[in-house]
Image: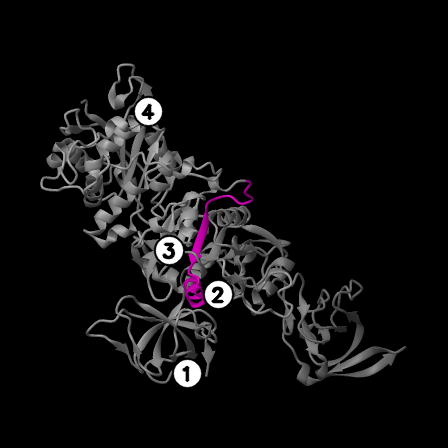
Amino acid sequence: MAPIPVGILTVSDKCSKGEAKDTSGPALAQMLSQTTTTTTMTASADGQPETKRWIVVATSVVPDNKDQIAEVVRGWCTPKRDDSATGGGDADAEQPFCRLVIVTGGTGLSPSDVTVEAIEPLFTRRLPALATAMVVGSLRITPMAALSQVAAGVVASAAIVLAVPGSRKGATENVGQILPVLPHAVDTLMARKGTRHLHPVSSAAPGESTAAEKAVSPGKSTAAQTAPMVLCNCGREGDLAASGSSDAVLATGVSNTLGESATQRARKSPYPMVPEAAALGAVLSSVATMAVEPTWLALRDVRPGLVVAEDIVAQENVPAYAAAVMDGYAVVAADGPGTYAVRGASMAGSADGVSRLESGQIARIATGAPLPAGADAVVMVEDTEIVATAEGEEAAVRIAESGRVRAGQNVRPVGHDLRKGAVVLRKDEAVGTVGGEIAAMAVSGNRRFSVFMPPTVAVMSSGDEVEDVLAPGSADEPGALAYGSIRDCNRPALIAALRALGCSVVDVGVVRDDPDAIAQAMRAALASCHGIVTTGGVSMGERDWLKPVVEQRLRGRIRFGRVAMKPSKPTTFATVPAAAIADSAIEGDRFVFALPGNPVSALVAFHMFVAPAVRLLSGHVGRPGSDAGGVVHDGHVASSALSALRPSVTAVFVGSEVELDRMRPEYVRASLVWNGGGGACGWSVRMVDQMQQSSRVASMQRANALVSLPRGTDAKRVVAAGELVTAIVIAAPHFG
C-alpha cells in the first residue's frame, strides 16, 4: 500500500526567528520514516497482517500565533481530488495533502502556548481517546506530562491532527504511545462507505489468536468469545450523536459518555490527580487571557476594591486659587502688627469678596476662601482684637505682636494639594476602603473613570437531594426535610464569598441530577456571565454529570479533573469556547469551576482557586485579557503574583498536634492572629475546630486562614505546637 503522507509543524517563536534550532520536528520525522506498523485491523483476506509506512511530505516552523498555526494546518488538511485513489475501500475518496499532521510545541501552560486553542476550532471531530493515550503513556515516564495540553482530532473530515509537546523528548514520547494504532485510525477515517472491511471476522476458535494477531503480539490470546470477534470498537453502535437529541455531540474528553448505564461508568477516575500548585497555574494561565474590557464609571458608581485601568490625571489645580487655611484676616505681611482698616470680607464660595488689598488694609477671611489680590498672608483671628465698628461691621482691627506673619503663612498656594496634570491614581492601583482614593478621584476634575470590573459569575448547586433555601418563599418557616434531603448551604456561601470579592452574581438555583437540565442551566447562565461556579456532581457517582456535560454538551475543555489535596480532591476546572454559547452578551471563552458537593470542600476549593482567578480577572495583577507572563512561568505561579492573588504568611502553629495525611497535602481551617513582634514570628494560627471533616460546616466558621500541611512521611508524621507553618489568608486576620 502507498505510504501515508504526514505533515510536521513546529510552533516556536525562537525557532521561527532563527534564534534556536528545531530539534523536535526532525526527531519526529526520523521516528516516522524509520517506523513500519504491522496492523491486524486491515489484514488481508487470508488473515495476514498488513504493513504500513509513513512519508513526511510537509514540514514548517511558525511562531506562537493562533492564526498562523491554523492557516498551515488547514492548508495541509484541505482535500484534493484524486480519481485514482483506491485506499480505504472507496474509489471516489478525497485525498488531502496530509493524512496525518503533527503539531509540536505551544502545548504548555504559558499564555503564549496557543497551539491547542488554534487547532481545536478546526476539528470536525475530536479524538479524545488518542489524546488520553498519549498523556497516560507519557505519565508513566514523567509526571510533568500532566502539564501538557495535548489534543487530537479530525480536520476537514480528512486528516488526523495531533498537538504534542515542543520538547524533542515529549514530542516523540507522546506520538510513540499511539503510533501502532495511527495507521488504522487513518484507514478508518478514509473509509467513507463503512469500516466493516477493516475489521475482519476471526475464523479462529474461541480463545485462539488469528495469524494477524500473533504477528503483532506473539503469545497473546484474546478472551474467549462465542460470537464472531471484531478486533476493535471504532464503529460501535449507540453513539450519542445518533441518539436524536438536539444537544448530542460526540464525547470530546475522557469523562463518562452521557446516555450510558451506571454499569458502564468508569470505576476509576480517568483524570490524573495534579498537584495543587500545577492546578492553580493552569487556572491562572487560562483566565489571564480571557477578555475583560475596562469599564467607564461615574464617581458615584466607583466602589472599594475596583482596580484602575488607566492613569487618572488631574484636570485642574487644587486649590485653583490661593486659599486661606484658617479663619482670620488677609494681610500684607510686610505691614507687621498694628491697627488697620478692615476693607471687607472674603468668604468661601462667594464671588462677592474683596478684589484687592493695598498696604495698610486688611480683610476678614474664612477658611478656604480666596486670598484677595495684594495680600500674601493670613493672621489667625485669635491674634487680633476689634478697635472700632460702624453699622454693626468691623471698621478697624489691631493685630497683636503674636500675629506677626511671613509672606505665604497660613495660605495654600495654587496647586498646593494637587497640580494639574499630576497622576492621581496610577493604573493597576486598587481603590481602598478608607476613602482616600475616592476623595482624590473626586477632586481631580474627572467625570468618569476607567476601571476593571470584577467578573459576573453564575452560581449553581446540583443534586436531587438538595433543598433550595434561597427560593421564593424560603424565608417563611422552613418545613421538615424529606428523608434523604439536605439544605443547600453551598450556594448561599459561595454567593456571599463572590460578592465580597466585588463580583456581580447570577443565582442559577438548584438543578436536578439530569444532564439535559444541567446543560440547559449552564448554557443559559454562561450567555450572560464570564464563568460559573457549580457544586456537586463532580465525583464518581452514577449521577455525577458535571464533567461529561461540560465536555459533551458545552464543548468545554477540562484542564484538570482532580487535585492532590485534602479536602476538595474532585475539584474540576474547565474552559468553554465562546462559540459554544449562543446569543452571548459577553465575548471570549468562559471559565467553569465545578466544585465538590461537601460544603467545606467547596469553600476550600473556592479560596484556593476561584478567589485567585477572580482577583486576576479584576486586574489585581497585570492587565486582564493580556499576556499572563508576569503571573505564570513554566506552569508555576510567580511569587509576586501569588502574594497578591492568594496571600499567605508564616505562622506559629498553636494547639494539639495534627497527624499528617499520608496521601495528600491537607488544608485545615484555622484562626490567624497577629500577636506582635515577640519571638521568631508575630503570627500564630490555631484550628477553629478539631473535627475537620469536609461535611462539617462548623470547621469553616470563624476561619480566616487555611493552614497548608504537607503530606505525611515516615520521617514527618505530625505537625506539633510551636512549628512554623504556612497560613493562606482567606479573610482579615485578628489582632491581639
Say which of marks 1 and 2 sits in front.
2
The residue under label 4 is: 192
Asked whether residue 60 appears in the rendered view, the answer is no
Q: Residue at x 59, y 65 (%)?
A: 417
Residue segment shown in magenta: 583-607
Q: Residues within 10 Å of mark 3 (few under 14, many from 20)?
A: many
Residue appearing at x 54%, y 61% in the figure: 502
The amino acid type, in three-letter code, at marker 4 is: Arg
Color encoding of the figure: one colour
Q: Secondary structure at mark 2?
A: loop
Whether residue 602 is visible here, answered yes or no, is yes
Q: Which mark is residue 675?
A: 1
Separation of residues labelled 3 and 2 (CA atoms): 45 Å
Q: Mark 3 = which residue?
A: 631
* Residue 594 within the magenta-colored segment of the rendering: yes
Q: Mark 2 highlights which residue?
A: 484
Q: Given this view, does label 4 or label 3 mark the residue nearer the observer?
A: 4
Quadrant of the rendered structure where residue 284 is? bottom left
